[in-house]
Amino acid sequence: MTDLTPEFWKHKSLAEMTSDEWEALCDGCAKCCLHRLEDEDTREIYFTNVHCRLLDLETSQCSDYANRSTRVSDCVTITLKELEDPYWLPSTCAYRLLAEHKPLPEWHPLVSGDPNTVFDSG
């Protein structure tokens, strides 16, 4: 990954971000790798404790990120189109927060400078 401009997310829209900036938004929480259920009437999302088979539980990273969409048919790649209605993403997800014009939390690695703060914060 190349050097990132400090606080780029405050100065660029999601559409203006480079691929490195886009990828840096992910805090590595792996919540998007959990299977979820949706109440069709309320659109409320319930996260399960069942995860994608490619999720490495020790690192919270995808074990085959480059090929995830071909290996797992229901793997969702976060795109601008997906962010038009991001209700299904975790409320703490940076992509959702920025799509909803909200700030990143203090524990986000881009804000804290420490990738462990996402886990330290729970």
Image: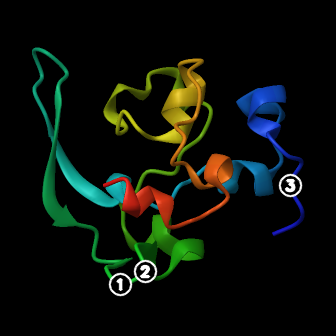
* Residue underneath mark 2: 59
* Residue underneath mark 3: 4
* Residue underneath mark 1: 58
> Which quarter of the figure is the N terminus placed in?
bottom right
Q: Residue 46: image x %, image y %?
A: 14, 39
Looking at the rendered structure, the kind of residue marked 2 is Thr
Label 2 Cα crowd, 10 Å radius (few <14 / some 14-19 / many 20+): few
Label 3 Cα crowd, 10 Å radius (few <14 / some 14-19 / many 20+): few
> Which quarter of the figure is the C terminus placed in?
bottom left
* The quarter of the displayed image where residue 60 is located: bottom left
Q: Secondary structure at mark 1?
A: loop
Q: Report how many numbered discs are placed on residues in the image.
A: 3
Q: Secondary structure at mark 3?
A: loop
Examine the rendering and report whether any part of residue 12 can be seen.
no
Query: How far is mark 2 from mark 1, CA to CA?
Result: 4 Å
Query: How far is mark 2 from mark 3, CA to CA?
Result: 23 Å
Q: Residue 41: image x %, image y %?
A: 10, 15
Q: Residue 5: image x %, image y %?
A: 89, 48
Question: What residue is drawn where x is 65% and y is 46%?
Answer: 111
* Dot 2 and dot 1 residues touching (CB under 8 Å): yes
Measured along the vertical axis of the image, is residue 75 above or below residue 65?
above
